[in-house]
Amino acid sequence: MRERATSPVYAQIAFDIAKRIAGSELKENARIYGRSLLASEYGVSPETIRRSLRLLADMGIVEIRQNSGGIVLSREKAKQYTLRFNEYMDVRALQKRLRALLIEQEKTSREILDIADSIVYTNEKFHKHNLFQAYEVNVPEASPLCGTTLYAADFWQHTGATVIAIRREDRVILSPGPRLEVRAGDWLVYIGDTAAIDAVEAFVESKER
């Protein structure tokens, strides 16, 4: 349901009088009561009624008479005025809705920027505390690691990498202990700098240690 815009009180009263004229409640050449009576009827000040009648006079709907209110001049112009007034109020309502949407859009845009900033900050913070990329290497059957432990093989001393997990078939062994034997087909998940990649592959695939 479209929201209606709010117009000044004097314009609303002018519109109401014009509707009464357009609907023949007030006929052409009929006398409109003085400002005091209209002010009492609408519950407003005489000055507000004066502005309402002046608006209708400017539209050629009524003629203002000194100290006697006014005379209805044109029912047709009153009908045209009510139609234009409704169109004007529809446009005002659309403008009001547009302003509300623009304010909402600006608020949403600020929230998006705040979220984006938070993501960037979190990523930067994560990277600062996660200096090493995790890599994986498969242990072939001919590897000298098969049947021995990482500790016994001096894995870290030879590669500079630290094994943080072993993927074995359908399970993951986190932080493998010093007595865990490495098997063929295991995947070693390790961290280290880029130089450690070649060292690990060479060590795992070497025929002799």
Image: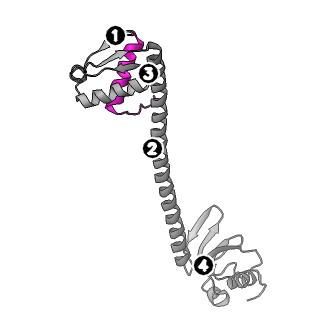
In magenta stretch: residue 168: no
Image quarter where the N terminus lies is: top left
Tag in front: 3 or 2: 3
Q: In terms of sequence position, does the residue under pointer 2 or pointer 1 come before the other?
A: 1
Which residue lies under the disc numbered 3? 60
Callout 2 environment at 10 Å: few (<14), some (14 to 19), or many (20+)? few
Q: In terms of sequence position, does the residue under pointer 4 or pointer 1 come before the other?
A: 1
Q: CA distance from mark 1 to mark 3?
A: 15 Å
Q: CA distance from mark 2 to mark 1?
A: 44 Å
Picture residue at 48% right of the left edge, 52% below the top: 106
Amino acid beneath label 1: Ala
Q: Judge by depth and name the residue closer to the eye, 69 or 192.
A: 69
- Secondary element at tag 3: loop
Q: CA distance from mark 4 to mark 3?
A: 84 Å
Q: In terms of sequence position, does the residue under pointer 1 or pointer 3 come before the other?
A: 1
- Secondary element at tag 1: loop
Q: Which mark is residue 30?
A: 1
Amino acid beneath label 2: Ala
Q: In terms of sequence position, does the residue under pointer 2 or pointer 4 come before the other?
A: 2
